[in-house]
């Protein structure tokens, strides 16, 4: 600021020019203050993510195409049928952009190449029906720059296979493990009892009767006796991945 | 193993001696396999923690005194009145042990000196009534070897004070922030919108009407639009601290 | 009454005529007493509103057409598909009547011109999915004679845009602000912390897991730490608008 | 700003002086921006309110006595027994301060005279057990500068007495009516069907069985067929009064 | 029994004959004892009622056609579309049988003439959407031999119309009134406050948000301050009618 | 009215006198219209009932003593300890009044003799813990002029004793049976399967785990397969008795 | 019966005598039929069990003393403080009776010697706080004639100790295992995955937050992926033991 | 082990051979330890069961066809429509395999002959709508080697038919009875009151209003006064059958 004022005195700037420059500085500071919340996205490097559910088709297309002009775009909760209906209307002005659709994860990714991977996390599911949520988490985590080791369906194969999978992850130096489980939701507790990295539990809405909606699994995880667990909303693979990636990033910045 | 077998052939070991040695090796391996779950405590260095609620006085004393023979002990959820009743019956055989009681945290710590601190986390509360849960978290985190920056009651002082507190924490290079909040539980979302470290939400059972028991706060946090949040059980300062310390440790081991 | 009795004495009225006149007066008074509840509609000037859900097509058409004979009609919760099916069977005897359909608000309005606007309110939504409820509120509020300033999707654009939108509303002298929000439902608290006009929270059934059905948002709003908030039923844009319009009218009558 | 810059050019200010002045201006603007949330209390003129529940006695006393140094203080949810225990430790440095305690409302008011009343609201309760919540609302509303007309226990006396009480309130030109009701919570609907001012429903935790905790009343009010109702949390007389006072203030500012 | 024994002594019966006769008597008594629960249907004269939901088409047809061989049959919860699909496969062997289908009530009645009516009850609904449940109740009540006075949609027309409808019912000497209401479920309380006959509340699953599923209405009715009300399950028009008919029958038998 | 008008013409009344008389007539009619809701109590002959819970001691005493001046008074939910504390402050001005206290029913009755009994009802409980609610119902029913046959604890004694008790009630010509049951709440269904009089189910808050609060029993009764059942709120012996007495009265008026 | 008839013919019995004898036979048969439900207790050999909670002291003493006249008595849910107050008033007429009180199980047993044990079951608890429920189960199972192997607090000692305890139980040939667990309730699933005997899960009300009341544990067990589990009510050690004993008895009768 | 070591000394084994043999022994023991959980399936002899719901068609087919290569396969929750779509793509390499589909049970069984039956259980349903769940249980129980006696729809036919059916089952020496019931769920209690074999309750999601989803039935069964009942998840016929078969197997092994 002193510099501006001195230049004003020195006649290098008119009063109007000086005022304009000072105002700009002020706005930047003000904006900086108020926009702390947007700065975060820039620093963490997540692409823009669009939640497809609850948006009408034309509206969704418009948002995707607008975002795609600015770069990478991730669209979540986009059912395959809907993707097939919309895909011909996607506008990819930039030739470097490619479309990738993962029907299990229900994610559409418009990308300009591969993201460089800098840290590792693990993703484990108890059963086959938990895989879609795990795949959503995997794609989001990779997009956030993490390498992901997956081990699906270990609940079915017995506890000894779980042991070997966890050993593999620990040896690969994962910094966080996401455990996706429906039904009784006991798997995160078992895993947290075996490892010393943060375990993020994702309850799934798989099941029926008292398990319908995933509430039994959610409460089971919140109630876990093993104290290294934190939990995200039911079926929220996206949130689990962002959280786990934030953990992984702490270890990289060091 | 080959070595043992060779020594047997060489007559350096009798069959009985060889059998005994091999069995020992085998047990070690077996135990190693089965006891993965205990290894964790050793590695992470948490002291033994005893949950006082729901244990009768004589039973609790016996457990504490037994544990104290082996070293540091932390007793959680021990109300001040109960502590005052029990404190004269604590047996500290080792002169190096000291007793510390924090009535807000409701934690009794039997310690043999200060724990070396190796990484940092922040703890924020929305209101005064959330402080006991935050204090529980602070003591557990410190015992787990973390330096803790606290900022209590920021919800009351207005959003600008929250900004400055968060800035202070980020500048101190905290690797995780625990946010304790009852009522509507909105604070973790606000914080997660401003930082790029993992935010662990702890709902508290403060409040009345629809907020009684902390369920409104819990659901609010699970439902948060800001995706860097994971949640622990209502009032579970202990679990939040262990989880956050696990995150912090990831950054130190690197 | 004295006048009637005097005319009776004066022979201007027969006993039968006098009795009939007195009875009529009495009924009017009686009716007036009993019909306090209908008087309200007349005074506040709301058009007749018909809730379309749960009414069979022929039944709904009959009710609409009957009402349209008496003047303006508003039909709420009328899905676009259903409107397209029914629109050719609408009977508009009066040439001054026009049909307006808002697919987002799911409102059909049969109107005879524009309503004069006399006071202002604001409507804010957190996300895109909350817009239908907000649009319902807007149309109802305008029909009730209020000018409406809207600011949709501010939750996405960051807190600094929220500040500028609220400033715009306050400068326009709105007398009430409706805040529509799903998920964690934190926006009304934030708004109520910034303004000194009544804030009416409308939780929406947007979301999944613990947020499904809008209950997390509802409880969050009821539980809000910011004390200038009152709440209506989940997705009840109609009720919020009527309430807010009632508030606005208080300021006009003065 | 131009003025400062001109004075700098004119040599009336040194660069350092100019910089300091500009920075101060900037901070004021920044603060002004960030502290919007505190401005509101100043403008609306509410005294500081302290929620006594969940605060330990020494802590509560300290907060009260600190606040009392700055002027009027209102302490809510302070049970009579607790008040009697604490009252001798209240420090009223200023002789103009007086202590008023209302055991029904469970409110302690430290005041320096009467608040000037500028607008009117009504408060109605269904039964005797709803009176404490209504009294809390009354005291808060009066402290916020509103004149309050009360009509307690009208549910018991029959619908005809309700009619006459409402008529009295309307004739007195109340701008909002708070209706406090437990059990089935039907009273706000009845009132809203009769008046054209905003009706704020306060469910109370009176009752047993399905009505325990006030949830039946809350849901009944949210679900009301009469669309001029908005609702606050169970037993939240404080929130209802602040909201209603905010409504009343809109009519006065005009 | 004495008679049998005497005839045995007199040689009119052999021992075998006597034993057989006594056993038969005993069985009759035993059966009589065990079958108390079937006796009831015979005495109260309800036709067989078949609940259509959850039964596959062939199964349902078989049950209906079997029952129709024995006389009158009532099929409840039979959607119109399903009725149209099945009606040609109904087997009415007896020419005196007629088929009557009420699409609103979703009831199919196979009857052999009109039931003689012996007592009266009233059925009132709050809104249009409550009519299907009310119609179910009406048809069941008529089939149980009661004359039914209906008054639908009185909630909409205002409280003065409710008064006149109730007056009409009381003058007709109804012995019970069924009140069908969704949303906030307040109507049964209002009615019970005006009459001295039993009021049976039927909550309906009309509504959305906190009212979805009819639970707000149910709890409201159970919680009612007016003590002459008893309640049946949500949407249970059938149960309400059987209960009310049982009440009416008490007055006829006298 | 004609008579008044004629007398006016005939000079027997002045205009003022006539006007006054007509107005009085009108008010009577108006009042009559509005006060339908109080008429009911008079006709059904219930004494005034005061709900003791939630009223402070002085307040309760004042209400009781005021009512006692007008005649019989019933105070419900008055715990024995509280009764013993208050009984010396009861003011019975009229010597004909007697005090009766039933500690099981928690009812205080101030009476001027016995009520004449005109019809019969039965009250059955499943277990011992349901007796307080049954006793409340019995006293209220007797006060409403009904003779009551009770059969407590039949659930324990086995189904054959239930049969004999029900037979006894039916032979005594009861017109309604109240069945009080906690836990699984199956008894009302069993009874309704055996009788052809209305069965009123009263769930009780006896039990623990999923049965805590009486909700399992309530839902079980609402869900009953036996269609002659209606239900009142948990523990609401009072409401069940008033409802059953209203049923019994229908049979007497005939 | 033939014999009676022949004796009648032979003149050995009069008609009256024969009728009386036949009626007695008939009643016995009838009773036999109706009392199937009591026969069960006789056959299974359970002592009479009295649930102490919810019974007043004099009432409880009367029931206990009455039962003690007929033989063994078990009183459940009798807190130690209450037992100490009552124990001097227990009347043990028969000298062979002894009193045994287990404060953890909260069971008072009046016995005449030891029950012969005929089959085995296991009881496992996850934590210390689950022990009271397990002890209740143990005492009831022993009283029902089963030998019980217990293994408390295995959740704390780690999964390898669980393995060895289960191995011990299987080697001892237990025919059923009761698993008592609060918090997340995962233990029964783990056990059921390891054994081929029926596993009965008993959720306990231990815990706080989402685990309060035992509902998380209950739902977790009902939702278990391991299909050899059945569940009883929260804290219902009694029911679990009776069920398990019934299972064990099946293997003995063979 | 000694034997191997001795053979090593005796030169019958080389060091390498000995090491290999010892390692194998060790692995066997280790595996044996870790794989306790798979041993169970082998011993109990259940075929592989595949839960069809929540698996995509290609995925499901792949799993079925893979399993069918190893022997018998049971696919549960496979709707008829889906079975018809998939059946032509089933690959049965082995000619001895046969396909059996039960549309009521929604079970597909690929089998190589009949299972030998070794013990008996009974299955009872309250109503027609409970039959699908009962049929699922029956097929699973038969596949587990149990003979099953069924008695469907006894709730409708009256309590005397229930008595005769239960008598038939007891005379056939069933070792467990599964009782499937929706609505109020009272049937298991009635059955458990009559028999001395374990009763497994299966609540069904039949019903509406408070019974929707089967929660009223579930709670009713958990809350049952008859203590020989244990419960499985709503609609979980599979789990009930596995549990009951496990009970039956205990009696056979003896």
Image: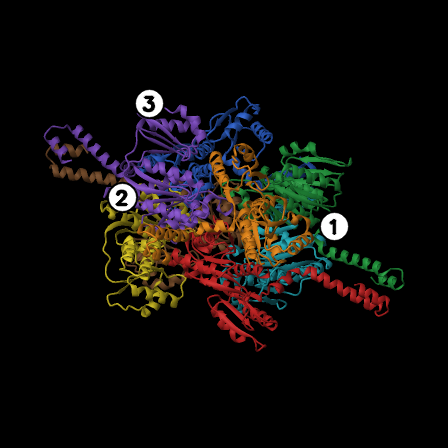
Chain colours: A purple, B yellow, C blue, D brown, E green, F cyan, G red, H orange
- Could you tell me how far apart the alpha carbons at marks 3 and 2 are, in whole angstroms? 35 Å
Q: Secondary structure at mark 3?
A: loop
Mark yes or no: residue C225 visible. Answer: no
At x 66% / y 33%, what residue is drawn?
A: E86
Quadrant in which residue E122 is drawn? top right
Most foreground residue, G131 or C13: G131
Q: Quadrant of residue E127?
A: top right
- In depth, the one of H225 and G208 nearer the eye is H225
Disc 2, SS = helix
Q: Split into 4 quadrants, where in the image is the C terminus of chain C?
A: top left
Residue bearing mark 2: A250
User: Label 3 neighbourhood size at 10 Å, few (<14), some (14-19), many (20+)?
Assistant: few
Q: Quadrant of the N terminus of chain C?
A: top right
Both labels 3 and 2 in a single chain: yes
Q: CA distance from mark 1 to mark 2?
A: 79 Å
Label 1 secondary element: helix
Question: Could you give the CA–CA distance between mark 1 and mark 3, rounded to whole angstroms?
Answer: 81 Å
Badge nearest the viewer, 1 or 2:
2
User: Where does residue E40 sit, x and y in percent of width and height?
Assistant: 71, 51
Q: Nearer the viewer, mark 1 or mark 3?
A: 3
Look at the picture and state if C144 lies above or below F111.
above
- Return the residue nearer the eye: D126 or G36: G36
| Residue assigned mark 1 | E43
- The label shown at residue A93 is 3
């Amino acid at each position: 600021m002193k510099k501006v004022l001195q230049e004003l005195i020195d006649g290098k700037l008119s009063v109007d020019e000086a005022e304009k420059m000072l105002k700009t500085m002020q706005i930047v500071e003000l904006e900086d203050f108020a926009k702390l919340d947007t700065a975060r996205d820039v620093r963490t490097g997540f692409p823009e993510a669009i939640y497809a559910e609850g948006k009408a088709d034309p509206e969704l297309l418009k948002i995707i195409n607008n975002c795609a002009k600015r770069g990478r775009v991730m669209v979540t909760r986009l059912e395959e049928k809907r993707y097939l209906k919309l895909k011909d209307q996607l506008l990819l002005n930039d030739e470097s952009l490619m479309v990738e659709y993962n029907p299990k994860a229900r994610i559409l990714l418009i990308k300009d190449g591969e993201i460089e991977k800098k840290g590792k996390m693990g993703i484990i599911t108890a059963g086959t029906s938990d895989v879609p949520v795990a795949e959503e988490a995997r794609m989001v985590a990779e997009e956030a720059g993490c390498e992901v080791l997956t081990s699906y369906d270990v609940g079915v194969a017995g506890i000894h296979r779980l042991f070997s999978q966890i050993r593999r992850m620990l040896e690969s130096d994962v910094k966080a493990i996401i455990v996706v489980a429906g039904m009784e939701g006991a798997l995160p507790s078992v895993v947290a009892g075996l490892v010393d990295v943060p375990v993020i539990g994702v309850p799934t809405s798989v099941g029926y009767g008292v398990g319908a909606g995933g509430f039994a699994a959610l409460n089971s995880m919140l109630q876990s006796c093993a104290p290294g667990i934190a939990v995200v909303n039911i079926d929220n693979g996206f949130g689990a991945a962002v959280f786990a990636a934030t953990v992984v990033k702490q270890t990289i910045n060091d």
